[in-house]
Image (tube, grey):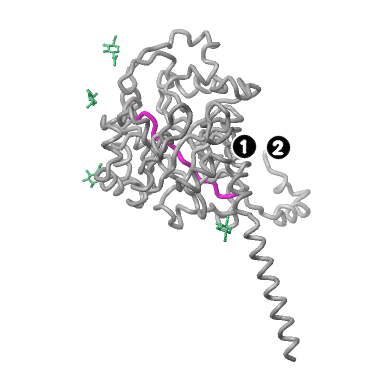
Amino acid sequence: MALSPCFSPLVFLFLIVGCVARPLYPLPSKVAEGSRKPLQTSRPYNIAHRGSNGEIPEETAPAYQRAIEEGADFIETDILSSKDGVLISFHDVTLDDTTDILQHKEFANRKRTYEVQGTNTTGFFTVDFTLKELKSLRVKQRYIFRDQQYNGKFTIITFEEYIAIALDAPRVVGIYPEIKNPVFINEHVKWPGGKKFEDKFVETLKKYGYKGSYLSKEWLAQPAFIQSFAPTSLIYVSNQTDLPKIFLIDDVTVPTQDTNQSYWEITSDSYFQYIKQYVEGIGPWKDTVVPVKDNYLLTPTDLVARAHAHNLQVHPYTFRDENQFLHFNFHQDPYQEYAYWIHKIGVDGIFTDFTGSLNNYQEWTSHSSNDSDSSASKLLHKIALLVNSYEKV
Ligand SMILES: *[C@@H]1O[C@H](CO)[C@@H](O)[C@H](O)[C@H]1NC(C)=O
Ligand SMILES: *[C@@H]1O[C@H](CO)[C@@H](O)[C@H](O)[C@H]1NC(C)=O
Ligand SMILES: *[C@@H]1O[C@H](CO)[C@@H](O)[C@H](O)[C@H]1NC(C)=O
Ligand SMILES: *[C@@H]1O[C@H](CO)[C@@H](O)[C@H](O)[C@H]1NC(C)=O
């Protein structure tokens, strides 16, 4: 029968009541912004680097869902493209290190060597696979010392699927997508109408309602930071969207991806003066903020102070809990590392592989005895006033 039961004459009388009276709960994905817990803006941002990739293979849906459960303010991702021009959430230009591509004999002839940022790189490139082919692969954990039990279970996701995860979160969770390797992507992938990778990137954000400058009403409803190592791309997209942008800065030995400028040039005061017209902040590799020798921290540079003097936020990367990433100064305690960067260096956001740890650190230190002391003392004060007023009567 083609008619829905609501229109069946025999049951019409009963069911019309049912159909009309069924309360129209909003779909979880459509809950009005106001009723979701807003983004916190009173402490450094917890940026879930590639999701909770310390636990679950990077940039997969479960890695992002886990990060949201664990308290991420922003879920972070890298945007690349498939051969057929679909934007995907994936970090490396090659599939070799984080998927099961080597087990797929049907793709054995796709191995290529391309020049990527001045280096000849050999492997299986995302730009040589259609989205359908990419979806037939499964993602695996990058580091051998991390949990391997999820290898082979989850697919690569698209930029749109990544956005949907943030929009479906039970509270406001921001996105933090990177325009990744734009020079390489524009060389290898062509879109209809002469559109560039950056155009498709911004189009996707607009399609899902991402807009507005930092802390504007629109932004707070759907927060997003656009990040890139390529200043040309950030400047280009600033004509298309006023969403805040973060200029990523690599190791002191690595020039910019597109303009081949040195670390020293792009961290100079005159460059900060220029780039701050386009970006809200910088995202430096943390060892350039505090250099390291023999796994001990050296004296911090003035990078954070100078960025702050230009009203630029500083979101360093990447914080990882494991011993092999913790400098000896922190005595194998990731909380000591967070304390140092938040209180001594004074950063505005942290890219972490372990969102849960950073969130615990921030929760446990912000609900310190001070808060309870002060509310307890307020209560005591009220009681004292009350007692006082009785005494006067
Ligand atoms: C990459 O390989 C090609 C072909 O062998 C060569 O012409 C080119 O100079 C190489 N580029 C780099 C950066 O080594
Ligand atoms: C931005 O738009 C203006 C006005 O249309 C144009 O003059 C300028 O070249 C554009 N800038 C970039 C970086 O595309
Ligand atoms: C980038 O800059 C370095 C240092 O100035 C120079 O040696 C190199 O040739 C440049 N590379 C490109 C691709 O322009
Ligand atoms: C707790 O109080 C002390 C002394 O008033 C102050 O220095 C410290 O910053 C406070 N800590 C927090 C987390 O508010």
Which residue type does callout 1 highlight?
A: Arg
Where does the image place residue 24, in percent across and percent down from the top left? 66, 54
Tell which residue pokes out farthest to the bottom in this image.
393
Q: In this view, does 133 lie to the left or right of 368?
A: left
Instruction: Quadrant for residue 61, please give it.
Output: top right
Viewer can see residue 61: no
Q: Considering the image in quadrants, where does the N terminus appear?
A: top right
Q: Is residue 290 left or right of residue 269?
A: right
- The magenta span reads 171-182
Disc on res. 382: none
Which residue type does callout 2 highlight?
A: Met
For label 1, the SS is helix
Nearer-the-camera pick, 183 or 284 = 284
Q: In this view, does 244 lie above or below 57?
A: below
Does the CB distance between marks 2 and 1 fall below 8 Å? no
Instruction: Quadrant for residue 147, please give it.
Output: top right
Q: Say few, some or many: other residues with alpha carbon within 10 Å of mark 1 (under 14 / 14 to 19 / 20 or more).
A: some
Q: Mark 2 points at which residue?
A: 1
What's the CA distance linking mark 2 and mark 1? 43 Å
Where does the image place residue 183, in percent across and percent down from the top left? 31, 28
Where does the image place residue 268, in percent across and percent down from the top left? 27, 41
The structure residue drawn at horizontal position 39% and vertical position 13%, both measured from the top left corner, is: 122
Q: Name the residue under label 1.
A: 66
Q: Considering the image in quadrants, where does the C terminus appear?
A: bottom right
- Mark 2 / mark 1, whichever is N-terminal: 2
Where does the image place residue 286, in percent across and percent down from the top left? 43, 36
For label 2, the SS is loop
Mark in front: 2 vs 1: 1
Q: Is residue 48 magenta?
A: no
The structure residue drawn at horizontal position 26% and vertical position 32%, both measured from the top left corner, is: 261
